[in-house]
Image (cartoon, rainbow, N blue to C red):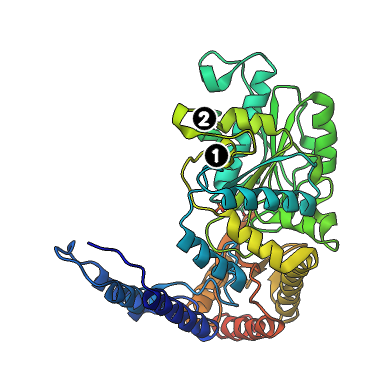
C-alpha cells in the first residue's frame, strides 16, 4: 500500500486538533460516561482490508477525542500535569513530520544541535554547574534512572569496581539514603539498578515532608543520597544546602528528584524554596509538567558528564558516532524521538522572563485557591510554598465525597491523597492555561459542591 501524506490529510488533522483545542476550556474536564461507553466502538477485530487515512483520522477524532481527559485545559489540577504551550504543540507537529531519530548526530543533526542548545539554556536557568552532562528522556522516572545509574557508576568506580562490565556480583556495597517522602519512581529506579527498593536508610521528614537534617545518618564515600525538589503532595523541598555540605565533606553523591520542583530555581521569586539545589551531583526534571511541553519529555543532569557516559554509552562499529556530544551516550535508549525540539521551542518562546512568569503564575493561583478555600471554612493542610495545595473538607469520608463530587460535576478535576494520616484533596496548578478567572471559578465551584455535600456549613 502506498502511503502518501497529502497536505489535505495533515490539514484535516490540524482542523480537527484546532476544534478540539477550541472546545477544551469549556468541556466537562473528565470524559462523560457516554464517551467512555463509545470506546467500545474501537474494539473491533483486526480489519482484513485497508481503510483510507481520512476515515481513520475521523474515527480517531470522533470516538477518541471525547474520551480524553481535558488535562490540557485550564482547570485540570490532578496529579502534577502540565498542558502544552501552543508553540510546543506546533513544534511537535513539525517534528513529527521530520520523523527524526535522535539517537545520533549523523541520524539527525538538528535534533543533536537543539538538545545541546537546550541543555545549555536549562543549566543556566536552573543554576546548575556549567559543564554538566544531560540526557533527554521520556519522564522523570527515566531521568531518575539515568542519573542514578551515573551515581552507581561513579561511587563504585572510585572503589575500583567497573559496574557496567562486572555487574553487582561481588561488588562493594553502596549505602543508599533516601528521604522518607522520596517519590516512588526513585525507588523503582533503585530497584531496576539492583540497589533494592528496601535496602535503604529512610530519613524521617517534618510536617511538610522535608527531610529532617537532624536525622540524616553519617555519610561516607560509598553513600548515595536521594532527595527531592517539590514533594508531590505539599510542594516542599529538602534542605539541599546542608545535605550537600555534609555529602561533599564525606564524598557522598547527592541526587535530586526535581520533576516539577526544580523549576522553582528558574524563578527569582521562588528560588529560595530550593536553596542550594545546584550543589547536588545529579538532577531529574520533567518538561511535560511545569514547562508545559507535550508528553513526553524530561532531562537528567549530571555534574560529571563522564559518569553519565560511562553508565549509558554504547558502541558498535556501524553506529558512526562522532567526537561531538552524541545524544545516545547520555540516555538508556538508542532510537527515540527528538523530544528536545519542544523543550527548545518552549524556552525559545518564553525566554528567561516567560519561564519565571509561568512558574510564579501557577504559584499565585495555588495560593489564591488555598486562600479562597480557607476563607470558606475548609482546612488547607500544607504551607503553600509552590503550586501544590492539600485541602480537607472535614473527616476522611467527607473529603472523599467532595473529591468525587468535584470530578463528577466537571468544572475542574482534582485527585485525592492521604497526607500524614489525613485524607486530602490535591490541587496541583501546573498549566499555562489556567487564568485568574479560572481560579475564582474553581473556588466557587468547589465551595458550592462541598457545602452541598458536607454537613459542616
Ligand atoms: C511526576 C513525578 C515523578 C515521575 O515523573 P514522570 O514524568 O511521571 O516519569 C517523579 N518525581 C516527582 C517528584 C514527580 O512529581
Query: Which residue is at a point 58% across and 64% down the rendered structure image?
Result: 81
**Upstream in the sequence, badge 1 or badge 2?**
2
Residue 20 rendering spot, x and y as whole percentages: 46, 80
Query: Which residue is at a point 81% across and 40% down the rendered structure image?
Result: 279
Residue 28 rendering spot, x and y as whole percentages: 48, 82
Label 1 CB less than 8 angstroms from ligand 1: no
Q: In terms of image quadrants, where is residue 254?
A: top right
Left/right of residue 100 with respect to residue 226 in the rendered view: left
Left/right of residue 54 with respect to residue 235 in the rendered view: left
- Circle 2: element type: loop
- Circle 1: element type: helix
Q: Quadrant of the C terminus?
A: bottom right
> Farthest residue toward the left?
48
Q: Are marks 1 and 2 in contact (CB under 8 Å)?
A: yes
Left/right of residue 360 with respect to residue 330 in the rendered view: right
Q: Which residue is mark 2?
A: 314
Query: Which residue is at a point 72% across and 74% down the rendered structure image?
Result: 365
Amino acid at each position: 500500500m502506498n502511503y502518501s501524506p497529502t497536505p489535505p490529510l495533515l490539514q484535516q488533522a490540524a482542523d480537527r486538533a484546532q476544534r478540539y483545542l477550541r472546545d477544551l476550556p469549556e468541556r466537562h474536564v473528565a470524559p462523560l460516561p457516554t464517551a467512555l461507553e463509545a470506546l467500545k466502538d474501537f474494539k473491533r477485530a483486526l480489519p482484513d482490508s485497508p481503510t483510507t487515512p481520512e476515515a481513520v483520522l475521523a474515527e480517531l477524532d470522533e470516538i477518541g477525542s471525547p474520551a480524553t481527559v481535558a488535562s490540557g485545559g485550564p482547570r485540570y489540577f490532578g496529579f502534577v500535569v502540565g498542558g502544552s504551550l501552543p508553540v510546543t504543540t506546533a513544534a511537535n507537529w513539525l517534528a513529527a513530520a521530520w520523523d527524526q531519530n535522535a539517537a545520533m548526530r549523523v541520524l539527525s543533526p538538528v535534533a543533536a544541535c537543539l538538545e545541546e542548545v537546550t541543555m545549555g539554556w536549562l543549566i543556566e536557568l536552573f543554576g546548575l554547574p556549567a559543564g554538566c552532562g544531560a540526557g533527554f528522556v521520556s519522564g522523570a522516572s527515566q531521568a531518575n534512572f539515568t542519573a542514578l545509574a551515573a551515581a552507581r557508576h561513579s561511587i563504585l568506580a572510585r572503589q575500583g569496581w567497573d559496574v557496567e562490565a562486572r555487574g553487582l556480583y561481588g561488588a562493594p556495597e553502596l549505602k543508599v539514603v533516601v528521604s522518607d517522602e522520596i517519590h516512588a519512581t526513585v525507588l523503582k529506579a533503585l530497584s531496576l539498578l539492583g540497589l533494592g527498593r528496601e535496602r535503604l536508610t529512610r530519613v524521617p521528614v517534618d510536617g511538610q515532608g522535608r527531610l529532617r537534617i537532624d536525622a540524616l545518618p553519617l555519610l561516607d564515600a560509598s553513600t548515595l543520597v536521594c532527595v527531592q525538589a517539590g514533594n508531590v503532595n505539599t510542594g516542599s523541598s529538602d534542605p539541599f544546602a546542608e545535605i550537600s555540605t555534609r555529602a561533599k565533606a564525606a564524598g557522598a553523591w547527592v541526587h535530586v528528584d526535581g520533576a516539577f520542583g526544580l523549576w522553582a530555581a528558574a524563578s527569582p521569586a521562588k528560588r529560595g524554596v530550593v536553596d542550594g539545589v545546584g550543589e547536588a551531583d545529579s538532577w531529574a526534571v520533567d518538561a511535560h509538567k511545569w514547562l508545559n511541553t507535550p508528553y513526553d519529555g524530561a532531562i537528567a543532569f549530571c555534574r560529571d558528564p563522564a559518569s553519565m557516559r560511562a553508565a549509558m554509552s554504547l558502541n558498535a562499529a556501524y553506529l558512526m558516532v562522532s567526537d561531538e556530544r552524541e545524544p545516545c551516550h547520555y540516555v538508556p535508549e538508542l532510537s527515540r524521538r527528538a523530544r528536545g525540539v519542544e523543550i527548545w521551542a518552549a524556552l525559545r518562546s518564553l525566554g528567561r522572563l516567560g519561564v519565571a512568569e509561568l512558574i510564579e503564575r501557577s504559584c499565585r493561583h495555588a495560593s489564591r485557591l488555598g486562600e479562597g478555600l480557607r476563607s470558606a471554612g475548609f482546612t488547607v493542610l500544607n504551607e503553600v510554598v509552590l503550586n501544590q495545595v492539600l485541602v480537607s473538607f472535614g473527616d476522611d469520608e467527607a473529603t472523599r465525597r467532595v473529591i468525587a463530587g468535584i470530578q463528577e460535576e466537571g468544572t475542574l478535576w482534582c485527585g485525592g491523597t492521604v497526607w500524614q494520616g489525613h485524607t486530602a484533596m490535591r490541587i496541583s496548578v501546573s498549566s499555562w492555561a489556567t487564568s485568574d478567572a479560572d481560579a475564582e471559578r474553581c473556588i466557587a465551584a468547589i465551595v458550592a459542591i462541598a457545602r452541598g455535600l458536607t454537613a459542616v456549613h
